[in-house]
Structure formats: structure tokens, C-alpha cells
Amino acid sequence: MIVLKFGGTSVGGPEPIRRLGEIVRRCLQERPVVVVSAMAGVTNRLFRLADLAIAGSDGSQDFAALADLHVKTLRDLALDETLIDVLLDELQGLLRGIALIRECTLRTKDYLVSFGERFSVRMVAAHLRNVGIVATAHDSFDVGLVTDSHFGSARPVADVDGRIQAALGSSDGVPVVTGYIGKDAAGNIT
């Protein structure tokens, strides 16, 4: 097994994602696990959306630009443009909540910034399937990444490696996993 980690620039648009697919194809004999970040700049955009919500702005233009970035990438890769609609709706609901209380705790920020990786993993796995590579999208917390509850700077718990290996061992094809995020024992995204 080999772990291939792709940062934001490597998933920053259609062409980088196509290159990522070719790299994965060349490594199929080594049973790759693909770990991806949010698209370049998306985490900062998510922090900005939180700041706008706290300030009482609806941030609709910024939200639309973030959604458009992902939808355009999906379109350019000939993928289902509605692939991340559920996540976009969830994000929009979270931003409404932040705007209503005009507050964003560290726990809420961890949840908020998880969306970048969650968007990417679904897009990359869909692209790999589209080019004939069996791939499954996984949020890291669904394959055993448990952390402590230090929001804003959580660390994996001691026995996490065995959990992840066991979960990924039964994955269909190439597992495509979110980087950067996990969940604590109570189920909070960290």
C-alpha cells in the first residue's frame, strides 16, 4: 500500500485533478490510498465566510463564488454538477446559524472548514471513476480517524492507525480520503 497525498494546488482545478488521476493510474499496482486537501484557497474562503457571517453580512456573493468554483470544476471534468449539493446546503445552513448568533467557536470553525476537504474527496473520487479507476470517497472520520477534542488543533488518538488500516482494507478500489479533518469521540468534526 502507498499513500498519495495531494495538497490544494494538486486539486485546484480540472487540469490538476486530471494529472492526479494519471498519477493514481500509474500507482494502481501499489494499492494507493489517495488523501486530498481542499482546492487551493478554499479553506481561506471558508474562514472569510465565517467572518462575514459574524459581521452580519449574508456573504451570498462569496458563497456563490465558492459554489461556482466547485460546480465549474465538476462541469469541466464532465461530472455530475449536483455531486456536492447536499454539502453546499449543509454549509449554507451552518453559515445561517453563525450569522444568527454572530459567533463562531473553535468547534464550529472546525466543522466549517471541513467542507473544503469533503468537497474535494467527492470530486476526486468521481473523476477517478469517470476515467475507469474504481474509487470510493471517504471522510477520514468515517474510516477511523478519531482525535482528541482540542478544537482548532486536534490530534489523532493513540490507536488510530489500526482503525484506519482495518477500515481501508475493506474499501472498494482506491480509497480517496479527506486530509486535515477528523472527529472526536463525541462525534464532533475536528
Image: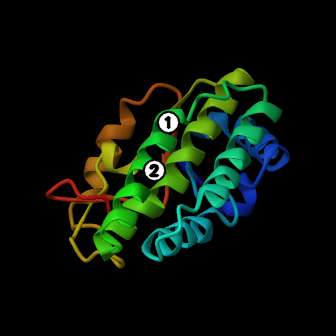
Badge 2 density bin: few <14, some 14–19, many ≥20, Cα 10 Å:
some
Task: Name the residue: 56% across, 45% down.
Answer: 119
Amino acid at circle 1: Ala
Image spot of residue 88 (x, y percent): 51, 43
Image position of 180 (left or right of 68)? left
Task: Name the residue: 65% across, 62% down.
Answer: 7
Query: Residue 76 lies in what quarter of the image?
Result: top right
Number of labelled discs?
2
Task: Name the residue: 75% across, 24% down.
Answer: 131
Image spot of residue 142 (x, y percent): 32, 43
Distance in Å between CA atoms under marks 1 and 2: 19 Å
Q: Quadrant of the C terminus?
A: bottom left
By what rule are the colours in the image chosen?
rainbow
The residue singled out by tag 2 in the image is 91
**Towards the viewer: 143 or 31:** 143
Q: Is residue 136 above or below residue 139?
A: above
Image position of 40 (left or right of 100)? right
Q: What element does badge 1 sit on?
A: strand
Amino acid at circle 2: Leu
Is there any visible trace of residue 2 in the rendered image? yes
Image spot of residue 65 (x, y percent): 70, 54
Comparing marks 1 and 2, which lies closer to the viewer? 2
Query: Residue 74 lies in what quarter of the image?
Result: top right
The residue singled out by tag 1 in the image is 137
Image position of 15 (left or right of 81)? right
**Towards the viewer: 78 or 133:** 78
